Image: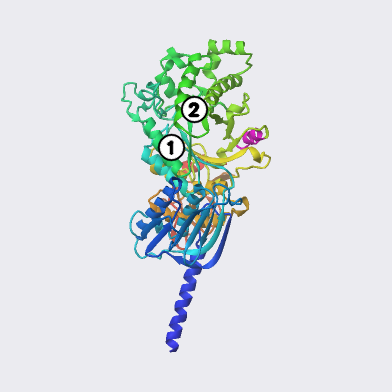
């Protein structure tokens, strides 16, 4: 009898420990406004009945639930409009819940059923994403997963976003991504409650959207010579080489992506980048340049064509700007904007405006005549003249214009919105002057930057670690919050050749941005976020989505003490042990643990570094030559 009681006690203790472990592992990204743990679990039954509203706006949500719950868990799922016998109830409020707004939700998980309520379908969609995150990570698998306890903790969640604009930008100009890949990008956005897809469709390296009235934009401007290497330092392409690298989206494909995104509560904002970044336009229509006869107009490949050693705005080696003094340019823009406005339901059209070199404008007699005629004093005024004329075209199509913060320099009209990328100051300034702003500063959310050490990353000109991204605040001190629409992370793809590398660059920094945009500021906590991030790595493993493990790799700093060089290693997250070698061998946890800065031996030629946690390797093996270390001296 005593033996039975002892076994029973052990079983109860085991169940209790398992329940506590399950509760400890609640890892929702972005962090909800309110989460109350009530103890116990809801176990998915073998037959799941989902009650859902019978309308088109919620059809995708029901379909998503059915697909997910029947795939990895292998459950039989029935969707009905009747709440009778339903163990998962999806409800639209008949009377608006003022606290949660249009995108918020209330999710109640009880031991016997799940109830999700929202004012709008958007809230239901985000509640469903949270529901999935309460389930084991295997829910992300595309095949039946055996030996999984399909249970979720009993909780009450109240949740709604901090800001309205929660964006991710994908540059498809530097490298083209297919419709299916773009959809894949959007699907991952939705999991983390992003709602704006900024589609950077045109640049020097390719024009990606069909404009039927201007067929050469895609016949010529969408294609270039393919080259692989470090963007910005590639060799000049052979003029006779085949121009077969690239691609574009037909208007039907654009509509397909828009409809796909809107079904997932994602609005799609197109970007047509002008007056700079226009090489692909000028390759197709050189008559729109200030110097059309130069013969240097072709779709760029990544070979140098701008001089960045100017301390500010680049100087152009080859012309890549539309000519603001050419009336044909505005006829061209009217044709483009007319078709873009008809395709995209979203209220804003982004027209770039960044990094426009003044080099060829300053040489142009036509631009000088324009300045004299219009009383324009400088090149910033010339760009402002161009921007205001383009904005009038956009307004005539019942749309609004948005641009990068350079457009503020020459003055902008009240209806123009700003995307602040060169720090937060321009966004603060614009908000104070009554312009709507999306905060998108390079030092927090430019996710094309290296996220780890140069020895592990495609080399670009700056770094952005996960911890720095997590510090992003879309409503900075000093801004007029009334005019801050929200924030956005941007992925430029100069060094991103395929969709797997897109995923690697976005995640986990995309987690950090999502939490900054959705969660209450006071709910953010770095160590808690790191633990959640690791849990979501497991989810991505089952989803076969790539991510960066850079947060496990140490930060390497080299200083000089007298005649000696000293290496200091710091970790971004807690609980890691660092092991090193200078003798070209591969260090492991039997080597001396790093405790203090290390002097580089005089004749050493390589340093190897690796991190461990709990006796197991967790970081990547980093190999940095002594020559490279010497270059890093601060």
At which x and y percent is residue 251?
39, 30
Q: Secondary structure at mark 1?
A: helix
**Is residue 73 one of those drawn in magenta?**
no
Residue located 48% across and 31% down the image: 271
Residue at label 1?
Answer: 258
At which x and y percent is residue 433?
67, 32
Horizontal relation, residue 484 to residue 128: left or right: right
Question: Is any atom of residue 565 visible in this view?
Answer: no
Q: What main secondary structure does the magenta stretch of the protein show?
A: helix
Residue located 55% across and 31% down the image: 402
- In which quadrant will I find the C terminus? top right
Q: Compared with residue 510, is residue 355 higher up or lower down, i.e. above or below?
A: above
Q: Nearer the viewer, residue 348 or 456?
A: 348
Q: Residues within 10 Å of mark 1 (few under 14, many from 20)?
A: many
Residue at label 2?
Answer: 273
Question: Is any atom of residue 145 visible in this view?
Answer: yes
Residue located 42% across and 52% down the image: 62
Q: Nearer the viewer, residue 543 or 607?
A: 543
Which circle marks residue 510 in the picture? none
- In which quadrant will I find the N terminus? bottom left
2 or 1: tag closer to the N-terminus = 1
Marks 2 and 1 sit apart, C-alpha to C-alpha, by 20 Å
Q: Nearer the viewer, residue 90 or 17?
A: 90
At which x and y percent is residue 442?
55, 38
Q: Looking at the image, what colour scheme do you see?
A: rainbow
> Which is closer to the viewer, label 2 or label 1?
1
Q: Compared with residue 295, is residue 410 higher up or lower down, i.e. above or below?
A: below
**Image: magenta residue range:** 423-431
């Amino acid at each position: 009898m005593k033996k039975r009681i002892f076994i029973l006690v052990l079983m109860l203790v085991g169940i209790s420990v398992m329940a506590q472990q399950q509760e400890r592992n609640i890892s929702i990204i972005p962090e909800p406004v309110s989460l109350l743990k009530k103890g116990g679990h809801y176990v998915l039954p073998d037959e799941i009945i989902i009650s859902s509203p019978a309308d088109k706006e919620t059809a995708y949500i029901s379909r998503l639930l059915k697909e997910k719950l029947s795939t990895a868990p292998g459950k039989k799922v029935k969707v009905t409009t009747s709440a009778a016998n339903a163990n998962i109830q999806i409800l639209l409020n008949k009377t608006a819940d003022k606290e949660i707004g249009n995108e918020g939700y209330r999710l109640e998980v009880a031991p016997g059923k799940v109830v999700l309520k929202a004012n709008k379908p958007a809230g239901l969609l985000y509640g469903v994403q949270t529901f999935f995150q309460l389930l084991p990570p295997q829910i992300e698998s595309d095949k039946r997963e055996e030996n999984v306890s399909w249970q979720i903790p009993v909780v009450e969640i109240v949740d709604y976003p901090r800001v309205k604009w929660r964006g991710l930008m994908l540059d498809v100009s530097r490298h083209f991504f297919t419709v299916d890949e773009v959809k894949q990008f959007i699907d991952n956005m939705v999991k983390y409650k992003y709602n704006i897809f900024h589609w950077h469709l045109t640049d020097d390296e390719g024009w990606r959207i069909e404009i039927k009235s201007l067929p050469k934009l895609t016949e010529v401007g969408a294609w270039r010579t393919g080259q692989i290497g470090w963007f910005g330092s590639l060799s000049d392409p052979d003029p006779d080489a085949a121009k077969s690298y690239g691609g574009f989206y037909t208007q039907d494909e654009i509509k397909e992506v828009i409809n796909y995104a809107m079904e997932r509560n994602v609005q799609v904002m197109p970007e047509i980048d002008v007056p700079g970044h226009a090489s692909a336009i000028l390759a197709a229509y050189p008559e729109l340049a200030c110097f059309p006869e130069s013969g240097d107009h072709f779709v760029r490949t990544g070979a140098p064509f701008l001089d960045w050693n100017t301390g500010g705005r680049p100087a152009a080696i080859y012309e890549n700007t539309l000519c603001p003094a050419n009336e044909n340019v505005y006829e061209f823009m009217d044709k483009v904007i007319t078709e873009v406005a008809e395709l995209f339901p979203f209220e804003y059209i982004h027209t770039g405006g960044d990094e426009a070199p003044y080099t060829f404008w300053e040489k142009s007699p036509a631009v000088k005549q324009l300045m004299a005629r219009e009383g324009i004093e400088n090149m910033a005024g010339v760009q402002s003249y161009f921007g205001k004329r383009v904005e009038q075209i956009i307004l005539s199509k019942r749309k609004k214009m948005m641009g990068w913060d350079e457009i503020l320099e020459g003055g902008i009209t009240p209806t123009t919105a700003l995307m602040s990328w060169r720090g937060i100051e321009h966004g603060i300034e614009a908000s104070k002057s009554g312009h709507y702003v999306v905060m998108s500063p390079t030092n927090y959310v430019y996710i094309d930057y290296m996220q780890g050490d140069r020895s592990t990353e495609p080399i670009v000109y700056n770094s952005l670690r996960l911890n720095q991204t997590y510090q992003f605040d879309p409503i900075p001190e000093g801004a007029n919050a009334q005019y801050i629409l929200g924030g956005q992370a941007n992925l430029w793809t100069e060094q991103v050749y395929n969709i797997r590398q897109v995923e690697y660059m976005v995640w986990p920094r995309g987690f950090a941005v999502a939490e900054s945009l959705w969660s209450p500021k006071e709910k953010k906590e770095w160590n808690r976020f790191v633990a959640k991030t690791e849990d979501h790595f497991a989810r991505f493993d089952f989803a076969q989505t790539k991510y960066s493990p850079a947060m496990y790799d140490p930060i390497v700093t080299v200083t000089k003490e007298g005649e000696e060089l000293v290496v200091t290693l710091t970790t971004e997250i807690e609980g890691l042990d660092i092991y090193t070698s200078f003798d070209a061998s591969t260090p492991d946890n039997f080597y001396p643990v790093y405790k203090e800065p290390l002097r580089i031996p005089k004749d050493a030629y390589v340093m190897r570094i690796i991190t461990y946690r709990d006796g197991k390797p967790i970081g990547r093996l980093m190999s940095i030559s002594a020559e490279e270390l010497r270059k890093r001296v601060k």
